[in-house]
Amino acid sequence: MVAGGYLQVLQKGMVTGEDLDSKINTIARNIDQITTLVNDILFLQEIELVLPEFDAVNMVKIAEVVVRKYEGKAETRHVTVQVKIDHNIPDAKGDARSLERALTALVDNAIKYSPPNGMVEIRLTTQADRVLITVEDHGIGIAPDILPRIFDRFFHVDKNGDELYGGLGIGLSITRQVIQQHKGSLDVESEPGKGSTFTMSLLKWQPLN
């Protein structure tokens, strides 16, 4: 039953006590999902229509912001998030707001698909003229037949074993769109039952002389 159905039940006074609390929590989760979906769709439309002017972006700070944002969710799922940063990571060439959204989607998925007491690792490294941001989890992984579809809009894993996963399958589409606009690359390696590793590759910022 979706949020609208629960609201009708509540309006008729058909539930009380603990069942009432459960229904209210379900409605709240549905509303959060709808709000997130609308915001994500609007963001996708915006970045498709308007290419932002790129500046120097401190990806270390972006990673720190995203990790702070997900401290509560990680704690609730008993997932540890670690950040490993090489020395002297240069700025990337890009749009800070878009790149934060791209990294947010990867971290959100990594936590969501990690097992209880699992570990998510975010690594920032450099390679030639690139800044690499890697998000690795040790969760359910992605089956080979599904892997080509994970960046499709509204595609997501509904269930793994006895555990249901929320979300409406648009986060990875945002990440791919952002990285494409930045002339970067987004790579994924995954093995069912062992986890997934996503790597964003961005151009280093080259100041004008």
Image: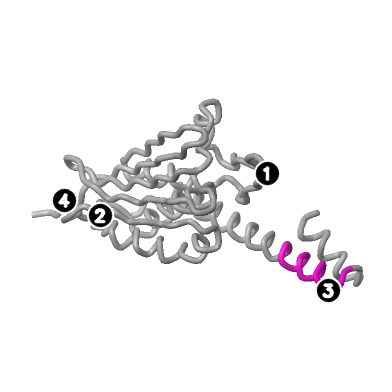
In this rendering, which labeled residue sits more in front, label 4 or label 2?
Answer: 2
User: For the point 59% across and 39% down, which residue is it?
Assistant: 155
Q: Is residue 93 left or right of residue 5?
A: left
Where is residue 21 shown, x and y percent of the image?
76, 70
Label 1 vs label 2: CA separation? 36 Å
Q: As shown in the figure, which amino acid type bears the numbered disc 2?
A: Ile
* Label 2 with label 3: CB-CB less than 8 Å: no
Where is residue 207 shown, x and y percent of the image?
14, 54
Examine the rendered structure and indicate whether residue 129 appears above or below residue 25. Answer: above
Q: As shown in the figure, which amino acid type bears the numbered disc 1?
A: Asp
Name the residue that disc number 3 marks. Answer: 17
Res 8 quadrant in image? bottom right
Label 4 vs label 3: CA separation? 61 Å
The range drawn in magenta is 15-27
Residue extending farthest top: 145
Label 1: which secondary element: loop
Where is residue 137 shown, x and y percent of the image?
44, 45
Name the residue that disc number 2 marks. Answer: 85
